[in-house]
Image (spheres, rainbow, N blue to C red):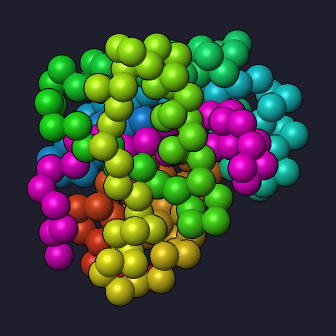
Amino acid sequence: MILLPDLPFVLTVVTKGWYGEPIAFAAVVPDGQGAMQDYSTARLSDEHVRTAENLTSKEQEAILKLPVVATKAALCEQFWSFWEKWIEHRPFRLQFIYDEVLHPGALPFLQECVRVDETLRRDLDPLKVDVATLLITHGYNPRTSRYVIAKMAGGEVGNLTHLALAIAACYTDLQKIIEGT
């Protein structure tokens, strides 16, 4: 079941605590076959990652492999630079975000990035669709975990780029993901 045409962009954000500050992100641009065409990842300090109680040790281990930036502002800027690069390639501004139903992270992160320079960025703010809404509208459990989605797409649990690619697979072919759960 193909739900929408081409997926231009996927963002997943990790927060410290379920509703806390962002500590890492992975942004992925899949190609037409669902493979990774381009990506950007970053995280804050080891301390931010190691003290995040909402992360398993396997998730922490994977996140600690990402490139480090010094501040939350730098995290935003790295993401935003990547986003602007791809807006030039694909003028259709669909931002597909994955937020677990009870623990959103990507939307507040996007809002923070826009607020850095709201006058210039508000018109570039991505349109958003989240996986939970997509699941609900197709009659599936919106609480399908990121672990299940990542595993079904053949990725490693905790690896943010694998999770983002799994989200892309969920977007372009939701039925394959659901049948495997």
Task: Specify whether 67 is left or right of 26.
Answer: right
Task: Specify whether 112 is left or right of 60.
Answer: left
Magenta span covers which residues? 1-26
**Residue at left 42%, top 35%?**
27
Q: Position of residue 69 (x, y in %)?
A: 65, 16
Q: Locate the N terminus and report the quarter of the image it occupies.
A: bottom left
| Label total for image | 0
Q: Is residue 104 visible?
A: yes
Q: Position of residue 101 (x, y in %)?
A: 57, 66
**Whether residue 99 is situated above or below residue 91 in the rendered picture:** below
Q: Position of residue 168 (x, y in %)?
A: 32, 54
**Residue at left 56%, top 35%?**
109
Q: Position of residue 138 (x, y in %)?
A: 30, 81
Extreme residue toward the front, this view: 119
Q: Is residue 23 magenta?
A: yes
**Residue at left 31%, top 20%?**
84
Q: Is residue 161 visible?
A: no
Q: Is residue 111 magenta?
A: no
**Residue at left 47%, top 83%?**
141
Q: In terms of image quadrants, where is residue 31?
A: top left
Q: Nearer the viewer, residue 3 or 38?
A: 3
Q: Nearer the viewer, residue 95 or 162?
A: 95
Task: Specify whether 24 is left or right of 162.
Answer: right
